[in-house]
Image (spheres, rainbow, N blue to C red):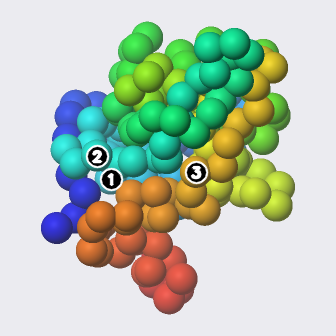
Amino acid sequence: MPQQIPWKSVVITDANIDDVEEELGVSFPAQYRDFLLLYNGGEPQSPVGLFHNGIDKNTGSPTTTGLESVAYFLGIGMGKYYGLEATYNKYKRDLPDTLFPIGIGFAENIILLALTGPNEGRVYWWTGRRDDAPLLVATDLVDLLSEDIEEGPLQAAEQKRRDGQA
């Protein structure tokens, strides 16, 4: 069964995405644009596991001792807590230029997407602290969302693009 990510209360268009890209000075990969058009953020109904992680109490550095998963994905025009614009503006000083926040984990960590460069489209987990390096958790959004599912709408959109139909 495809991953369900409900609460698309703000319907967006390509023009809305273009406006946000211009406002924030970024360019989203095609796969993330598809994701925004399909879901525009939301809470996954089934767990989207990232990896087992934790924070070392002595050093504050990431470890691999607990479970982390996506609590919700950020969306355009979703306000202070669920909006990708507000979250980006909150963390942009501490983020590497190539990474962009797309979600929040249950432990209030940040889910990031590489927008440019050789890692474009890869998904990372980050504590939100400047000194902590983001950790790679998936090769792309399809990889992140398809761990426990068959074919969903994002996978179908990606396949159409690869086939030259989109």
Disc with the residue nearer the chain's start (1 vs 2): 1
x and y, in percent, of residue 14 in the image: 47, 49
Please state if 144 lies on the left or on the right of 4 as rendered. right
Residue 123, percent from left and from top: 60, 49
Q: Quadrant of residue 76?
A: top left
Label 1 neighbour load within 10 Å: few <14, some 14-19, many 20+: some
Answer few, some or many: residues within 10 Å of disc 2's Cα (few below 14, many 20 plus, some between 14 and 19): some
Image-based side of 123 in relation to 82, left or right: right
Residue type (three-letter) at the residue carrying disc 1: Leu
User: What's the CA distance linking mark 1 and mark 2?
Assistant: 18 Å
Query: Label 3 to label 2, Cα distance in Å?
Result: 14 Å
* Mark number displayed over residue 47: 2
The answer to which of marks 3 and 2 sits earlier in the sequence is 2
Q: Amino acid at mark 2?
A: Pro
Q: In the rendering, which numbered label is found on residue 73?
A: none
Label located before the other in sequence (3 or 1): 1
Q: Disc 2 on helix, strand or loop? A: loop
Q: Amino acid at mark 3?
A: Val
Q: Quadrant of the image for the N terminus?
A: bottom left
Q: Is residue 151 above or below residue 132?
A: below
Circle 3 sits in a helix, a strand or a loop, which is it? strand
The residue that disc 3 covers is: 137
Q: Residue 78's spot in the image, x, y percent?
A: 37, 22
Residue 141 in view in this figure: yes
What residue appears at the point 78 percent right and 41 percent down from the top-left corner?
98
Which sits in the foreground, 76 or 70? 70
Name the one closer to the observer, 22 or 98.
98
Question: Between marks 3 and 1, how big is the CA–CA gap?
Answer: 22 Å
Nearer the camera: disc 3 or disc 1: 3
Residue 88: which quarter of the image?
Answer: top right
* Extreme residue in the bottom direction: 163
Question: In this figure, which residue is indicated by the disc labeled 1?
Answer: 38
